[in-house]
Image (tube, grey):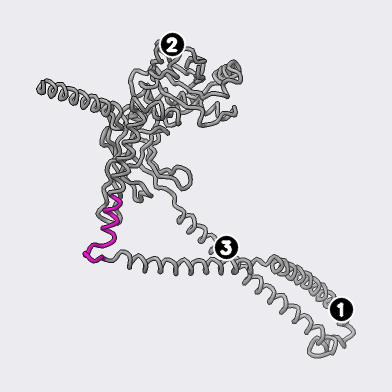
Amino acid sequence: MSRRNLAVGSFIIAGLTLFGLGIFLVGSRHEAFTHYVLLDTEFADLDGITKGSKVQVAGMDAGQVTKIEVPQSPNGQFRVQMKVDDQLHGLVRTDSVVTVDTEGVVGDTFLTIHPGSPNAGVAQADSVLQSKAPITLSDLLNHGLGVMSDADATMKQLGGKLNVSLDGVNSAVGNANDLLVGLKEGRGTAGMFLRDENMAAQIKETMASVQSTTSNLNQASVRVNSMVTDVQQRQLPQKLDETMSKISSATSQADATISQVRQSLAQALGPDANGVTAAQNINETLSNINAATGNMAEDTEALKHNFFFKGFFNQRGYYTLASLSPQEYRRSKLFGSARSPRAWLEATSLFQHGPNGTEELSPEGKRSIDTVVASFGDVIFKYPIVIEGYSDAPMPADAISLSYARAQLVRNYLDSRYPFVVKNVGVMPLSATPPPEMQHDHWSGICILVAEKK
């Protein structure tokens, strides 16, 4: 009897172990049946990107950073390796650009791979994508300081030129006054000429010319004085000097603060009693934190997709459209229901070829979209909306890329014309295969779905 009980217990334990292993494989974030493609890019400054950072393709979560290679010299670049979901591989082209983005103002940083042009080829595995360096706050401050320095130099040059002009005018007026006094007192050759009656008329004419010249000089002096007064009233040089003084004071304080920080860091980063530096301790601690954070994220993601906890996370709002693959979307009861309001629009009447060969909405297509929105009524503004894109291109990568571009065109038009909440309008590229139980087994164009819960 004891042997029989031992056999039954061993069988139950083995069955529970296999059942738990199956649940882990199905709900794990690694997804045993999901394929990834490894791609590389290079940055001179990572700006907060670390191993395990999220990677998005066209706004959809596509993978994470798997490895970062540190350059051997200061003029080198960091080599970043990313794994991208194979289902979104068709959107990554050879001319795609990788940028560093931030969630909000002070949120976590992540990498965004922007979709390339339809005419470019699909980026192969282990290929190096182009990158765009992020703009930091220090660059903006340095640019502002340069502008203020140029303005200060310009105002100083203007003040010097005004002083020279005033000195010249005052000197001319003084010389004219001296000449008039000498003529009236009879000094010099001009005074002698005044005694000659034959030259009196000529001297008078000369004096009239001199007086006219003096009047013009006085007017010029008044204008220059008015300009100087206006500049002084506006206090432009004083304001510039005050601004530069404040900037210099702030710079001095910043230098002092940096010196204190450097001194504190030098003390803090010194070796401890065991001879290990603080930098080594910090690196080891950060490595442990990154490992723990990655494990926690993997466990949380596994719970989201687990059979027992999936419904709980859906109600909490963790189950978003961006995390759904086209296959999961077709199997969804909410988005794959034939009872949800839908509007099917063909590509031939909805799009036209633009100047550069890409598709764009035609005037007839815009009128068709307006008619669909009017037919739905107020219900279209109460529930989430999904723009399903379809394309019957022969190559799978071209089909998913074109279907995504078509859905994005319709979404941009709805966002610019109607008061939709941006987060309530999503896109889903489905190539040429709609969800099952639809009235169409194959489609090329757009389907507007109102995800109304029945």
**In the image, residue 452 above or below residue 306:** above
**Where is mark 2, residue-wise?**
438
Q: Which residues are magenta?
A: 271-287
Residue at coordinates 43% horizontally, 10% vertically from top-left? Answer: 440
Three-letter amino acid code at the position of disc 3: Ala
Q: Inspect the magenta stretch and tell me whether residue 98 lies in it.
A: no
**Where is mark 3, residue-wise?**
151
**Where is mark 1, residue-wise?**
204
Sequence-wise, the earlier of marks 3 and 2 is 3
Three-letter amino acid code at the position of disc 1: Lys
Residue 43, numbered label:
none
Q: To which quarter of the image does residue 103 belong?
A: top left
- Horizontal relation, residue 408 to residue 417: left or right: left
Residue 448 visible (yes or no) = no
Residues marked 3 and 1 touching at CB (< 8 Å): no
Q: To which quarter of the image does residue 199 belong?
A: bottom right
Q: Residue furthest top?
A: 439
**In the image, residue 268 above or below residue 167:** above
Q: Which sits in the foreground, 114 or 280?
A: 280
